[in-house]
Image (cartoon, rainbow, N blue to C red):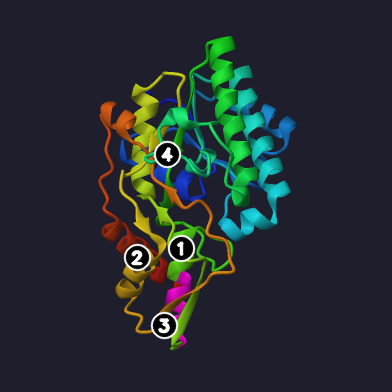
Amino acid sequence: MDKNSRIYVAGHNGLVGSSIVRNLQNKGFNNIICKTRKELDLTNQVAVEMFFKEEKINYVFLAAAKVGGIGSNNTYPADYIMENLLIQCNVIKSSFDHNVQKLLFLGSSCIYPKLCPQPIKEEYLLTGPLEPTNEAYALAKISGLKMCQYFNSQYKTKFISVMPTNLYGPNDRFDENHSHVIPALITKIDKAKKLDKPTVELWGTGTPYREFLYVDDLADACVYLMEVYEDNEHVNIGTGKDISILSLAQLIKTMIDYKGEIVFDKSKPDGTPKKLLDISKIEKLGWKAKVSLEEGLKLTYDYYTNIQKQ
């Protein structure tokens, strides 16, 4: 990418998109194009087509998506598959129609089968049933990945896909019921501390293992791959390390200095029992995560406490 290339970051206000914008700016890219949802509805095909026609985009980071935690995914599956498919189809098709040089599509590690061999290699895609609680979101992301591959095969485009593990960091959504694991845990445990509650109740059993990637590491990987990678196979992005939900909760409890007890509501779903990505491919390409879980949690909690004061 040239420093003056017209780079469109779709979803620039979100967790991933905002981090990609920061990374690009820090590296001297000065022609970054961003549109809010009010300015450009990515589910509207005509609006997206007009945007690409007028803006003459060179590169696209497709980070826009409807995202949420296990409860939200399980409750609103129609919304998750419909909105994500519309966004993906509109942006990818318009990128093709208007000669975008390269597009990077952001998927999710939930695209892999529920009971996948560990660590999960890229080739394990579509080798077994998906986790039911986020099947709708996963199917949308698989479709986006395949759409990029099919355009590359048929039209010789340069559309690449990355599959990050569970993400966290600044600009995440902190909500007890609708956010991802780490912001949900931070919100619940911090609230229990402030209310001086003797216990804090978390979903599931605490036994599932998850891998967590600090969002600024993901952004750095995306910009790096946009520069160096052009193959048709998608690329996993992670840390290569996982932790149980119970251990993660205890880590956050200690960080927040909550003195109460963690209890689990075993009637609530756990999701996939273990999800650890094989990251040998991206490491061979020359990239590795830099931020440790402990460091990332501290940075995320600092961000959370700052927005609470506002």
Q: CA distance from mark 3 to mark 1?
A: 15 Å
Residue 203 among magenta residues: no
Q: Position of residue 189 (x, y in %)?
A: 43, 75
Whole-percent x, y for residue 38 in the image: 66, 48
Q: In the image, what residue type sits under mark 4?
A: Pro
* Of labels 4 and 1, the one closer to you: 4
Disc 1 marks which residue? 183
| Residue sitting at x 47%, y 57% | 172
Mark closest to the chain's N terminus, 3 or 2: 3
Q: Residues within 10 Å of mark 2 (few under 14, many from 20)?
A: few
Camera-nearest residue between 186 and 220 = 186
Residue on which disc 4 sits? 117
Answer whether labels 1 and 2 touch (C-beta < 8 Å): no
What range of the chain is rendered magenta?
Answer: 187-195
- Which callout, 2 or 4, points to the residue nearer the camera? 4
Q: CA distance from mark 1 to mark 2?
A: 15 Å
Q: Which residue is mark 2?
A: 247
Kind of residue at badge 2: Ser
Badge 1 marks a residue whose secondary structure is helix
Against 33, residue 190 (above or below) is below
Q: In the picture, residue 122 is in which quadrant?
A: top left
Q: Mark 3 = which residue? A: 193
**Residue 188 within the magenta-colored segment of the rendering:** yes
For marks 4 and 1, the one nearer the N-term is: 4
- Which numbered disc, 1 or 2, marks the residue that appears first in the sequence? 1
Q: CA distance from mark 2 to mark 4?
A: 22 Å
Chain-order first, disc 3 or disc 1: 1
The residue depicted at 43 percent of the width and 25 percent of the height is: 5
Q: Is residue 112 above or below residue 97?
A: below
Give the position of the N terminus as an image quadrant.
top left
